[in-house]
Structure formats: structure tokens, C-alpha cells
Image (tube, rainbow, N blue to C red):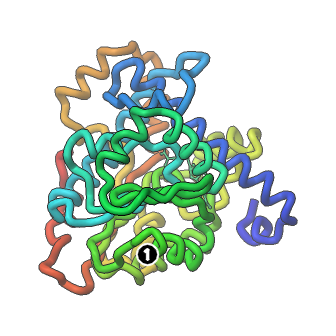
Amino acid sequence: MAAAARDHLPAAGLDEADEAVRGTCEDASVCKRFAVSVGYWKDPYIQYFVRQAKERKAPEINRGYYARVHGVSYLLKAFLKKTECNCQIVNLGAGMDTLFWRLKDENLLPRKYFEVDFPMIVARKIHNIKSKPPLSKPIMESHSGESLLIDSHSLDSSRYSIIGGDLRFSSDLEEKLKKHNLDIQLPTLLIAECVLVYMTPQQSANLLKWAASTFPVAMFINYEQVNMTDRFGQIMIENLQRRQCNLAGVEVCKSLDSQRERLLLNGWETAHAIDMMKVYSFLPQADVKRIEGLEFLDEKELFEQLMQHYCICWASKDSSNLGNVLQGLEGLASITF
Ligand code: SAM
């Protein structure tokens, strides 16, 4: 659907479209839980957020999630290292992501970790946190000071905060984050893992512009579709449309160049984008060999095509030059993960 048409949908149409977008949260976390259960990577927390998949997921899907989780994790750890964890992370459209708990286990918590998602998703996540001690305990352990604030659509502790909101309205977003003690002077990492594609190009541009103009020192990591104008991309779009899920922002997912361009046009100083096949080839090969032994992959060509239709992009800015916090991160373009 064209961006303009979507912007003028009646409220009921938008609700339905948003419901389908919210449904992608369940899809992503069920796939992650399945891949974890096969042994692709370790995540002791995902089991508390989603049910186990009823059917096996295909090996190419599991390998894709493996590359996605490791690729994003590589970049975010580079940021944490560079800032010595003296920073904050804002995970946009976090869904049931378990990153906070995994970072705590590794002793890599930033000063504060924020998550934002639709209020309905946040309510579900908070319900899980409240009812499952392996999730609530680490939040309590990292909390100090006054009592922890919690209601059905938000939770605020000293190190972890989760906020219900719509990312398409960045002014609301800033106000809500500030109520939860966002510190715009701290180096800030923003993550959007498979999220921007569900907004119109104008809406994602507004979000990126807001982030670039708000934080003097920041990095943005974006994982999403790319090369979507070819036949394979069209099939991906049709499959999602059949489930009433429109990729409102697919226009920006034309190529790695269009992905980079969006970041540079919206206030970011440096921008990189690589497709997931490349990410896969950069990952530590001993571990890649291990996971390749977990399941037999019949459809090698399908796997490669799938990986060429997703990418990781990252951008940075350091306008205050506060000790060149991000200097060197640009060099990640020539990385070995
Ligand atoms: N980032 C998580 C992950 O990778 O596991 C979830 C990915 S899921 C594909 C997309 C998430 O973005 C969903 O949880 C959805 O509710 C959220 N989302 C999409 N558009 C949003 C918006 N306008 N405001 C808030 N959340 C949004």
C-alpha cells in the first residue's frame, strides 16, 4: 500500500493494520525460542515470554535468526566497550527481547536500558515479568533507591525501564522517556530490530531525525529487509500481505544504498549497511561451523536468497566530540565479527 494511502486509512483500518504489526512480535520471539531450543545460541529467558513453536522452523530460518542475533549483538557490544557501559540503550519496538537479562548476566548493563513498544505488547511483557521470578529478580537486584514504579503499561526501575507508546509519534516518545529518567547527555545506542519497515518512510525518517537531533553522542542499529524490489522480495511482501501485514516502509528497503541514504539524510554523520549473507560470513567461523552441524540444510540457495534480503545498518554521530566516544566505530565496516 502506498504510504500516502496508509496515512489516510480510517481509524478502524489502522487498528487492524497495527494489530498485524503487533503480531510480528509473537512471530519473532517464537522463532527465537525455537532456534534457542535447537542450540543455535543460549538464551535462558526467552522461554518465559513465549510458548514453544508447535512445528519445527526450517533450518534456513534458524540460521537467519542466529545471524541476526549475533550481528546486532556484535555491534552493540562494540558500543558498550567503547563507552565502558557508561551509556544508555533504547530498544525501539523491543517486543519480547531478552537483551536486558542477557547483558546483566554478562555484567554488561548500561547505566540504563529502555524498551518501547505498543502499550498492548508492553502490558503482556510486564505481566510476564511480574509473574515470573527469573525475570523480576534481575530487575530487583539491579534496582536501588526508591520503590520501583510499575503499572499495566510501564515499569521503571533504576536500570531497566519499559514504556508503552507509538514510535510514530516521537514527541510523545521523548516525553515518556524523560519521565523514566532518560539522560540525553549520555552516549545513547538506539536499536530497531525489524521495526522501521512497519512505518511509512516519513514516520521512520521522523524517528531517526528525532534521535539524531536529541542525543549529542549516539549510535543507531537497524536490522530489516533489503533488496525488496526483485522477485524474491515481492514474494516476501505478498506472503506478509496475505496475513494482513503491510510493510509500509518497504520503499526504503530497496537497496543497501537507500538504507544508508535514509540515515545520512536524517541527521546521522556516518552510515553503513551490509546484507546478512555478508554478516554470516563475518561471524566467528568456529561457531558457524558448530551451528551448521545442528541441522541439515537442504535449501542452500533459498538460505542465501533469504539472507540477501535482510541487512544490518548502523549509524553514528558525535557532534559534541565528547572525547570522541564513537571514534573507531565507523571502522566496523571492515569488520570481522
Ligand atoms: N525487536 C523485537 C525482536 O527483534 O525480537 C521485535 C520485532 S517484531 C518483528 C516488531 C516489533 O515492533 C513488535 O513488537 C511491534 O509491536 C513493534 N512496533 C512496530 N511498530 C511500532 C510502533 N509504531 N510503535 C511501537 N512499537 C512498534
Residue 218: % across, % down:
31, 72
Is residue 26 shown to the viewer in this render?
A: yes
Name the residue: 26% across, 58% down.
110
Tell me, yes or no, if residue 197 can be seen here.
Answer: no
Q: For this view, does 260 lie left or right of residue 173?
A: left
Residue 157, by quadrant, is: bottom left
Amino acid type at mark 1: Ala
Name the foreground residue: 229 vs 96.
Answer: 96
Residue 319 placement: quadrant: bottom left
Placement of the N terminus among the 4 image quadrants = bottom right
Pick the front one: 269 or 74? 74
In the picture, measured across the screen, residue 327 lies left or right of residue 20, that is: left
Height in image: 26 above or below 162? above
The residue that appears at 46% across and 51% down in the rendered structure is: 193
According to the picture, the residue beneath numbered tag 1 turns out to be 211
Where residue 171 sits: x, y (%)? 57, 79
Q: Is residue 181 above or below residue 28?
A: below
In this rendering, is residue 155 above or below 208? above
Task: From this view, report whether residue 238 is shown above or below residue 2.
Answer: above
Front in this rendered view, residue 11 or 118: 118
Q: Secondary structure at mark 1?
A: helix
Q: For the residue carrying disc 1, how many other residues have a C-alpha within 10 Å: few (<14), some (14-19), or many (20+)?
A: many
